[in-house]
């Protein structure tokens, strides 16, 4: 089965890696992106439509011109801390604009969509590891905005015959193992690229947010998942839906928790250099521990091949290229 897939947000970090994986699997990725945080240089695996998801005329044209079968929807704002300072931006782009996008797609008869959700929908989970039935209680507007769209998808699944999958990623990190793509956020806020850049002398010391969490070494624990593993998971998810598979929310995490101090040690091994850090206060809206139960993902056939050292090694290789561009 060859699919013609509209990749909204395909000029961004996870979307560009997924466009590459789609092409490698024999599908056609058509990127729709307004370049608000993405990079045109990262669009290299199929046609590019520059525009916003809320522009119905643009979406309709793209769907018709490229005879789109299915959609991967990455387009969003994705900074937890920014969402607490500017909640309107998050509800406008992640919720309102996505609802307009779904309208345009459904009008054109496109009824298969994979949505980028997040472990931030769970807030501070009452038990670990996190299963998909763990109560969803976001503690920041970013997580809330993603949960609101999951609810919309669930209703459209029932009432509009939409086939959907909400992939709740844990912490995406690493870079394309071929060195062609990597993480280029501006500003960069994610832990791993910051630690790598600091070790390589490309930036100032990194502030570690909190050392007194109820975790074995006092720093926050996350479930880091390689972006290349996320990319292949999207290819599997969209083909699953296109073949008539069930609609549901699925955690994409490895099941292994890693503390910030353990990430620092991995970066030091990979670079052979000490990472300059400053230990500081916790950041608001930052849960102590987020680790996935990957059983549902495994049951759907997802396999995560890269461990933390592989994530860090590819991030180091990308940072050493020094261009910070695809
Ligand atoms: N990075 C992570 O660890 C992580 C974790 C969980 C979920 N997610 C989700 O995954 C998705 C991708 O994240 P990322 O890290 O690749 O972010 P990113 O900022 O690199 O990519 C988002 C892309 O969407 C585009 N975009 C934003 N608003 C748009 C609009 N209205 N119309 C068209 N294009 C638009 C941006 O230009 C960018 O290219 C997001 O939905 C994010 O919420 C990311
Ligand atoms: O300079 C920094 C940056 C991060 N951290 C800490 O390192 C951990 C990982 O931080 P990231 O910024 O890499 O990721 P987050 O866990 O904050 O956010 C990620 O997971 C979220 C779910 O909680 C969202 O999905 C979001 O899109 C995704 O980037 C967190 O405890 C964070 O507080 C620091 O100590 N210092």
Image (cartoon, helix red, strand yellow):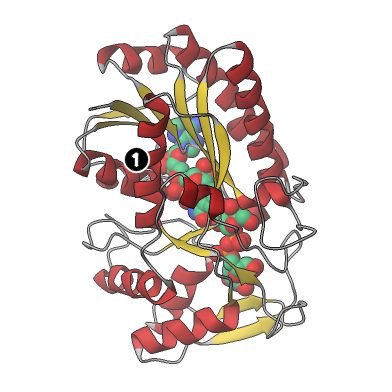
**Residue nearer the viewer, 177 or 292:** 292
Q: Where residue 312 sits in the image (x, y, percent)? A: 39, 74
Q: Residue at x 68, y 29 (%)?
A: 151
Relative height, residue 313 to residue 287 (above, below): below
Q: Residue at x 48, y 47 (%)?
A: 299
**Residue nearer the viewer, 224 or 180:** 224
Q: Is residue 81 left or right of residue 244?
A: right
Q: Where residue 75 sits in the image (x, y, percent)? A: 48, 36
Q: Quadrant of the N terminus?
A: top left
Relative height, residue 53 to residue 185 (above, below): above
Instruction: Name which quarter of the figure residue 7 lies in.
Output: top left
Q: Is residue 77 left or right of residue 324?
A: right
Relative height, residue 311 to residue 296 (above, below): below
Instruction: Name which quarter of the figure residue 25 lies in.
Output: top left
The answer to whether the residue bearing label 1 lies less than 8 angstroms from the nearest atom of ligand 1 is no
Q: Residue at x 39, y 56 (%)?
A: 303
Q: Where residue 27 sits in the image (x, y, percent)? A: 23, 33
**Residue nearer the viewer, 205 or 103:** 103
Camera sees residue 16: yes
Relative height, residue 296 to residue 219 (above, below): above
Q: Where residue 258 sits in the image (x, y, percent)? A: 57, 75
Single out the residue that lies furthest toward the front.
299
Camera sees residue 8: no
Q: Residues within 10 Å of mark 1 (few under 14, many from 20)?
A: many
Secondary structure category for the residue under label 1: helix
Q: Quadrant of the C terminus?
A: bottom left
Residue indicated by mark 1: 235
Q: Residue at x 39, y 64 (%)?
A: 174
């Amino acid at each position: 089965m060859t699919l013609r897939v509209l990749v909204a947000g395909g000029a961004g970090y996870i979307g560009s890696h997924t466009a590459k994986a789609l092409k490698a699997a024999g599908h056609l990725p058509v990127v729709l992106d307004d370049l608000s945080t993405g990079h045109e240089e990262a669009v290299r695996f199929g046609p590019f439509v520059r525009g916003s998801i809320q522009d119905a005329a643009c979406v309709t044209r793209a769907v018709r011109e490229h005879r789109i079968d299915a959609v991967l929807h990455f387009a969003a704002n994705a900074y937890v801390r920014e969402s607490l300072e500017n909640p309107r931006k998050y509800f406008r782009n992640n919720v309102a604009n996505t609802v307009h996008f779904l309208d345009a797609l459904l009008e054109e008869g496109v009824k298969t969509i994979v949505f980028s959700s997040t472990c931030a929908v769970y807030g501070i989970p009452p038990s670990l590891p996190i299963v998909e039935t763990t109560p969803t209680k976001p503690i920041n507007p970013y997580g809330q905005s993603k949960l609101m769209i999951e609810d919309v998808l669930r209703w459209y699944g029932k009432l509009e015959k939409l086939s959907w999958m909400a992939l709740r990623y844990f912490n995406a990190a690493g870079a394309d193992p071929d060195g062609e793509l990597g993480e280029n956020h501006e500003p960069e806020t994610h832990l791993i690229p910051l630690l790598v850049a600091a070790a390589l002398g490309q930036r100032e010391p990194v502030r570690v947010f909190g050392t007194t969490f109820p975790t074995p070494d006092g720093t926050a624990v996350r479930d880091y998942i390689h972006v290349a593993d996320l990319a292949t998971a999207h290819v599997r998810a969209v083909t699953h839906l296109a073949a008539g598979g069930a609609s549901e929310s699925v955690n994409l995490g490895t099941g292994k928790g890693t503390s910030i101090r353990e990430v620092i040690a991995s970066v030091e091994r990979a670079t052979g250099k000490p990472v300059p850090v400053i230990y500081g206060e916790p950041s608001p809206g930052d849960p102590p521990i987020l680790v996935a139960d990957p059983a549902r993902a495994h049951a759907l056939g997802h396999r995560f091949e890269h461990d933390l050292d592989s994530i860090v090694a590819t991030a180091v290789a990308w940072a050493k290229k020094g261009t910070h561009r695809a």
